[in-house]
Amino acid sequence: MQKIEILIGSPRKRGNTFSLAEMLIQNLDKEKTISDTTYLYDFEIKPCNDCRACKKGKMECVIDDDMKEICQRLENSDIIIIGTPIYWFGPSAKTKLMLDRFRPYFANKKLAGKMASLLLPSGTGKPDCDLTIEMFKRSFEALGIKYIGAVTAKAFDIGEAGKDKNAIASIVELSAQIN
Ligand SMILES: Cc1cc2nc3c(=O)[nH]c(=O)nc-3n(C[C@H](O)[C@H](O)[C@H](O)COP(=O)(O)O)c2cc1C
């Protein structure tokens, strides 16, 4: 069984990021995969303050908040799917808060060997996703995570991601890689 952890970094619970996640889940082989969804906006994620505690000793973060639970979910998974709307050519602030808190993983390499993909809706679609894709690609590389591609969707109002034919085709491709 492949364990898939899907992280939703949109404050709109039934928004386009959610729709892409739902489409992916529908395409996954239920006999080979088990998926779990985490809504980042339901969790308290404090900013990394560069205290550098994670560079010493147990190489763990000392901040007391819900990242502990998110980290458990990530460490228990085989494949990490990060879904975030594009906000100003980047990920949502909540998603970036989580990414910054991946700092201990740079030292302890606990996520190394896992696979990761991205679900990225934006009003403009693919052209506005390039910087976010590049940022995650390089971050995954630094963490030893294998990047398996991104799904971009041209979607502004809720419901539009499900109507983007290119996004649907990318979801089918991504699920074929996972299944
Ligand atoms: C603060 C903010 C910034 C945004 N910046 C961009 C942008 O740079 N490019 C773009 O194409 N869409 C941008 N959008 C539109 C969202 O990416 C789009 O509405 C997306 O579908 C929202 O996903 P959601 O329904 O999962 O929340 C922005 C939206 C907000 C609220």
Image (cartoon, rainbow, N blue to C red):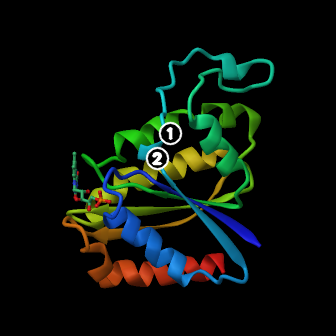
Find residue 30 and report its horizontal and vertical position in percent. Answer: 66, 82
Q: Quadrant of the C terminus?
A: bottom right
Q: In the image, ligand 1 is in what quadrant?
A: bottom left
In the structure shown, which secondary structural element does the residue marked by tag 2 occupy? helix
Measured in 3D between alpha carbons, the distance from the residue under mark 2 to the one under mark 1, in whole angstroms, is: 8 Å
* Mark with earlier residue (2, 1): 2
Give the residue displayed 24% in from the left and 46% down from the top: 88
Q: Is residue 130 left or right of residue 79?
A: left
In this orientation, does residue 144 appear?
no
Give the residue displayed 41% in from the left and 71% down from the top: 20
Mark 2: which amino acid? Leu
Q: Say how many tags the image has.
A: 2
Q: Is residue 171 left or right of residue 79?
A: left
Find residue 24 and report its horizontal and vertical position in percent. Answer: 50, 75
In this orientation, does residue 150 appear?
yes
Q: Quadrant of residue 109?
A: top right
Residue, far right: 57
